[in-house]
């Protein structure tokens, strides 16, 4: 399958840049049992936004500071970056007790102190809860840091409602929003809870992204003191400290303040989700994907879509799904972690997960693919068909109302309506193997383990309990009984009346028609039951 659109930009890492991601906090304001940085934004845990960015920028090591639910966070990071270039440079460090952002960064020190290895020239420090931040903004921050010869460079934003954020206190607020200001006027950052009313009125906030010179960072952190409303070691205090030592502090102000959104609450999580979703849609529209109603389409951050693919309203593409070119996905379809080929058609209300659908296949409506399904080229899966751990061979068809589980189905097979693989005996699962060009009639049950040989036909209504050799007909049906006139007689009995002449004649005529093939024994039984 061709993957024609590359979502991740080309990476150019910055020599000597070490990166620290802070992800140890619980996130009390989320009111959640799950640690904040694991909450998803567009299908991706928040912390991976920061780690992903770090992987694109860091020429030196990356330290991710974890604490609350650290095993889980570590696992999410490790599995999230396993196939990313540079993932070996990521080092996860523990902050056993969450004593503040300054304390968090302190814990990363050993990650950068390897024998015989040069220390980073600069550190980029990222909050783990700022998923909208762009890589180019971090590069700009670094550029300003270097051109201004700053010791600390901070990223700021102007907000109408700055509540909750740390405020940037400047010597001469000038009210102009240029992206670069002189290095001299930033005095300090004051946290919301520690701010005086005058400071709190400041609309310029600290985004929580910093570039700090290598020789300054850990030395300054050693001198932090937790003298504030939260009794925490604030990373932000290094700004005032640098100013106090006569070191240059620079600041970059975001053009688009939205990019600085810090996620502390569910409201902010929802806001971040909206923004990222919109960016993702714009990316794929730009890349040549048609969306009939973009606002209703959900595409996760890890999804890839080929050009000329058409997405109808209310389509959700989740996880690491890859969709090829020229594929059509109709309304209400949800696809998670699947590989979908080129020119595939998926009709309305189908749900697919962890499966592969090859080129020119046709699915739906109302198809359910559970994990482990492979639908080969030009195969067809029709309405109300559920599949699990099953391969449907090239050009094979399962068009109606079937359950196909733990089955290997070769090419050119017809699966009749209502076919069921009876794969589970209550304790274990068993496989069904169906050879090339087999024809299964409607309403067949295949009691697994069972094999249907190549070219065979299974008659409609058959329950297959034994293997069928190649090129054979398998038929297993209970003989049919037609008890002629039985219903008419019962009707009369229920009505409590004698048969009318017409109905008696009709019953007599039908008796003459030899419609049943039952044995004489069966006929006898019919006679007695009719008497009852
Ligand atoms: C922080 C800044 C604030 C800024 C805001 C931007 C400080 C003191 N304040 O406040 O100026 O406006 O971000 O969003 O830095 N963390 C740890 N260990 C800890 C505490 C926090 O790893 O002991 C991590 C959190 O998991 C989170 C990040 O640091 O990813 C920021 O912590 P949070 O508590 O959200 O800080 P804010 O109060 O938002
Ligand atoms: Ca925060």
Image: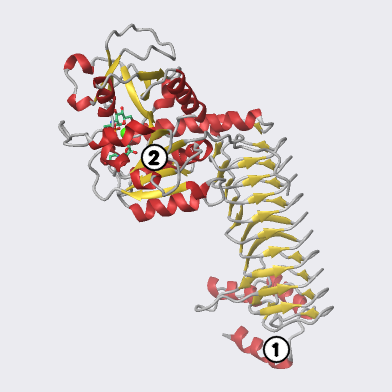
Residue 312: % across, % down: 63, 36
Q: Residue at x 38, y 7 (%)?
A: 176
Badge 1 crowding class, 10 Å Cα cut-off, few under 14, some 14 to 19, many 20 or more, is some
Left or right: where 345 falls relative to 112: right
Of circles 1 and 2, the one toward us is: 2
Ligand 1 within 8 A of label 2's CB?
A: yes
Residue 88: % across, % down: 51, 50
Q: Which residue is drawn at 62% across and 83% down?
A: 530
Residue 220: % across, % down: 27, 32
Judging depth in this view, the residue of 153 and 360 nearest the camera is 153
Q: Which picture quadrant has residue 309?
A: top right
> Which residue corresponds to mark 1?
523
> Which residue corresponds to mark 2?
21
- From the viewer's perspective, is residue 424 above or below residue 146? below
Residue 407: % across, % down: 66, 70
Left or right: where 393 falls relative to 488: right
Residue 496 visible within the image: no
- From the viewer's perspective, is residue 508 above or below residue 522? above
- From the viewer's perspective, is residue 187 above or below residue 452? above
Q: Which comes sooner in the sequence, label 1 or label 2?
A: 2
Q: How many marks?
A: 2
Q: How far apart, in angstroms, are the residues tagged by discs 1 and 2?
A: 84 Å
Q: Which residue is drawn at 49% across and 53% down?
A: 79
Residue 288 visible within the image: yes
Judging depth in this view, the residue of 416 and 222 nearest the camera is 222
In the rendered image, which quarter contains the C terminus? bottom right
| Quadrant in which ligand 1 is drawn | top left
Label 1: state its secondary structure. Answer: helix
- From the viewer's perspective, is residue 506 above or below residue 150? below
């Amino acid at each position: 399958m061709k993957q024609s659109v590359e979502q991740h930009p080309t990476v150019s890492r910055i020599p000597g840049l070490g990166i620290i991601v802070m992800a140890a906090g619980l996130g009390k304001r989320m009111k959640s049992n799950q640690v904040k940085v694991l909450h998803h934004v567009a299908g991706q845990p928040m912390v991976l936004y920061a780690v992903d960015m770090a992987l694109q920028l860091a020429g030196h090591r990356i330290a991710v500071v974890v604490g609350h639910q650290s095993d889980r966070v570590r696992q999410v990071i490790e599995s999230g970056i396993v196939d990313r270039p540079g993932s070996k440079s990521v080092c996860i460090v523990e902050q056993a007790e969450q004593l503040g952002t300054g304390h968090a960064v302190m814990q990363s020190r050993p990650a950068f102190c390897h024998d015989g290895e040069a220390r980073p020239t600069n550190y980029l420090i990222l909050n783990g809860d700022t998923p909208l931040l762009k890589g180019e903004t971090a590069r700009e921050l670094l550029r300003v840091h270097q051109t201004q010869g700053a010791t600390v460079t901070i990223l700021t934003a102007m907000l109408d409602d700055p509540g909750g954020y740390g405020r940037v206190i400047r010597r001469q607020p000038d009210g102009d929003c240029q992206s670069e200001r002189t290095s001299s006027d930033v005095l300090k950052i004051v946290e919301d809870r520690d701010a005086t009313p005058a400071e709190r009125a400041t609309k310029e906030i600290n985004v929580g992204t910093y570039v700090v010179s290598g020789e300054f960072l850990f030395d300054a952190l050693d001198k932090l003191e937790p003298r504030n409303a939260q009794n925490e070691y604030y990373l932000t205090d290094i700004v005032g400290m640098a100013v106090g030592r006569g070191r240059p502090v620079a600041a970059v102000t975001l053009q688009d303040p939205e990019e600085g959104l810090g996620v502390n609450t569910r409201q902010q999580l929802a806001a971040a989700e909206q923004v990222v979703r919109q960016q993702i849609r714009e990316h794929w529209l730009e890349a040549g994907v048609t969306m009939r109603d973009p606002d209703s389409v959900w595409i996760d951050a890890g999804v890839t879509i080929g050009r000329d693919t058409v997405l109808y309203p209310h389509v959700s593409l989740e996880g690491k799904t890859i969709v090829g070119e020229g594929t059509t996905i109709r309304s209400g379809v949800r696809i998670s972690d699947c590989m979908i080929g080129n020119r595939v058609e998926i009709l309305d209300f189908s749900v697919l997960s962890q499966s592969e659908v090859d080129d020119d296949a046709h699915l739906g409506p109302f198809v359910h693919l559970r994990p482990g399904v492979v639908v080969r080229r030009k195969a067809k899966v029709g309405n109300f068909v559920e599949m699990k751990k099953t391969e449907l061979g090239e050009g094979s068809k399962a068009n109606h109302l079937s359950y196909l589980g733990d089955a290997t189905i070769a090419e050119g097979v017809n699966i009749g309506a209502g076919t069921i693989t009876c794969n589970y005996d209550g304790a274990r699962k068993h496989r069904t193997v169906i050879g090339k060009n087999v024809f299964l009639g409607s309403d067949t049950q295949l009691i697994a383990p069972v094999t249907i040989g190549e070219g065979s036909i299974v008659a409609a209504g058959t329950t297959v309990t034994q293997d069928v050799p190649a090129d054979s007909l398998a038929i297993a049906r209970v003989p049919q009984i037609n008890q002629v006139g039985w219903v008419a007689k019962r009707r009369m009995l229920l009505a409590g009346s004698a048969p009318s002449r017409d109905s008696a004649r009709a019953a007599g005529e039908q008796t003459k028609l030899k419609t049943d093939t039952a044995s004489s024994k069966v006929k006898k039984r019919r006679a007695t039951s009719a008497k009852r």
